[in-house]
Image (spheres, rainbow, N blue to C red):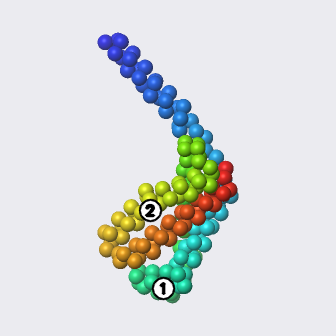
Amino acid sequence: MAQSTEDGQKRKRCIFSILNTNVTSMEFEINYLAVFLASVSALIVGSLWYAKFAFGKSWMKMINLTEEKAKEKMLPAVAGMFVLSLVMGYMLSHVTYMSMNVFGYSAQMAGISSAFMMWVGFVLPVLGGTGLFEQQPKKLMLINLGNWLVTLLAMGAIIGFFGF
């Protein structure tokens, strides 16, 4: 009986030593200027994407948003979006850093591929699923999904360009 307990402890130590030598011991480097600039890029992409000359007219019509109401709530919406973009940029920076270290990618490749994978793995299922359950028009779903694809790719390109 004592030997099986000893074997179990050896197995636990072995599992934990494997975990400790890989990702759990990795220290992350964050370029806060890159995160800030990536967050600014999210606002720029969004303002261009949802401008009247692009998808703004269709988008506003599909969500029943008037210009007056949009202008009334613009400042809190932009401020809130900037804070959320900082969170997204920070997390994208972590994922990019891990991609560089785990897969051996260059910073640029890691930034863009991580952004795309985060879009495919998180944004597409969340926005797509929400759109399906809310019975949104397909065009509205595509406008929003397209915005987030371009936004994340721009953020990933900036984070990758500035590196760590």
| Residue 20 in the image: above or below residue 52 | above
Q: Is residue 73 visible in this depiction of the protein?
A: no
Q: Residue at x 50, y 71 (%)?
A: 147
| 62, 105: nearer the viewer | 105
The amino acid beneath tag 2 is: Val
SS type, badge 2: helix
The amino acid beneath tag 1 is: Lys
Q: CA distance from mark 1 to mark 2?
A: 23 Å
Q: Is residue 131 visible in this depiction of the protein?
A: yes
Q: Residue at x 49, y 33 (%)?
A: 19
- Find residue 70 and report its horizontal and vertical position in percent: 51, 82
| Residue 20 in the image: above or below residue 113 | above
SS type, badge 1: helix
| Residue 90 in the image: above or below residue 130 | above
- Find residue 32 and report its horizontal and vertical position in percent: 66, 55
Which mark, by number, is residue 123?
2
- Find residue 105 and report its horizontal and vertical position in percent: 59, 48
Q: Residue at x 35, y 77 (%)?
A: 137
In which quadrant is the N terminus drawn? top left
Residue at which label 1 appears: 57
Tell me which corner region of the image, top left, top right, bottom left or bottom right, holds residue 88: bottom right
| Residue 66 in the image: above or below residue 136 | below
| 108, 67: nearer the viewer | 108
Q: Residue at x 45, y 83 (%)?
A: 58
Tell me which corner region of the image, top left, top right, bottom left or bottom right, holds residue 162: bottom right
- Find residue 127 and report its horizontal and vertical position in percent: 40, 66
137 with respect to 95 (left or right): left
